[in-house]
Amino acid sequence: MDKYKIENINFYQKTIFNILKLSILFTPLVANKYVDRYLANQEAWIILLMVLSGGVYLIGFLKEENITYKKNKIHLPLVLLILIVIFSFIKNGFLMSSLQDCIIFLAYFILYFLIINNLQNQYQFKSFIQIFFLTSFFIALYTILHYYNFISYLQEYGSVASLIGQ
C-alpha cells in the first residue's frame, strides 16, 4: 500500500497535479451557448489552467523543489511537430484565427508536458485514467440525453450536440 502514497511529492507537484485533474474534469462542462462560438469558453478555460499550472511548474523549477525535467525519445519529434504547426499557422494567410488555434495547440502541448513531468507513481497515473473515463462518461451521457430530447441546452446546434463540440 506504500506505493500509492503521495507523501514524497512537494507542494508544487501536488498543485500542478490537482490543476491538471481539474482541467480534464471540468473543461467539457464550461460550454456557454450564448457566446459566438460556444467552445470559446472551454478554450479560454484550458488556456487559463495551462498558464496557471505552467506558472506553478516554473516557480517550483526555479526554487528547485525537486521538480525535474524528464527527457525521452518523443521530445525531439514533438518539438519539430510544434515548429511545423506554428509555421503552418503563420503561413496560412488568416493570422488572427491561426493565432487563436496556435495558442490552443500550445496549451495542449503544455498539458502533455506537465503530465509527463509530474506523474510520479502508478497511483497518479490510475487517477488520471479514472478522470478521463469519468469525463468521457459524462460527455457520452449528456450526448445521449440530448439526442433523446431530455436536455435542450444546445438544441439550436442540431439533434446531437456534444459538450466537446463535435
Image (spheres, rainbow, N blue to C red):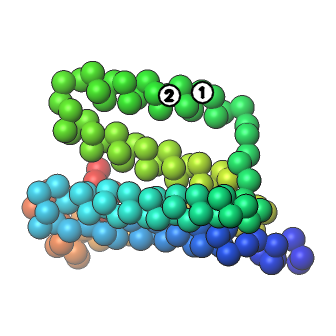
> Looking at the image, how many numbered discs can be counted on the residues?
2
- What amino acid type is highlighted by mark number 2? Leu
- What amino acid type is highlighted by mark number 1? Pro
Q: Residue at x 74, y 65 (%)?
A: 65
- Residue 17: mark: none
Q: Which residue is drawn at 40% across and 43% down?
A: 105
Number of other residues with Cα within 10 Å of mark 2, as a class: few under 14, some 14 to 19, many 20 or more: few
Left of 145 or right of it: where is 79? right
Q: Name the residue under label 2.
A: 81
At which x and y percent is residue 51? 44, 59
Q: What element carries label 1?
A: helix
At which x and y percent is residue 11? 68, 75
In the displayed structure, 107 sits above or below 146; it is: above
Left of 94 or right of it: where is 100? right
Of 45 and 29, nearer the camera is 45
Q: Mark 1 points at which residue?
A: 77
Quadrant where the image shows the N terminus: bottom right
Q: Given contact means CB atoms under 8 Å apart, are the residues at marks 2 and 1 in contact?
A: yes
Q: Which residue is drawn at 38% across and 63% down?
A: 48
At which x and y percent is residue 23? 46, 65
Q: What element carries label 2?
A: helix
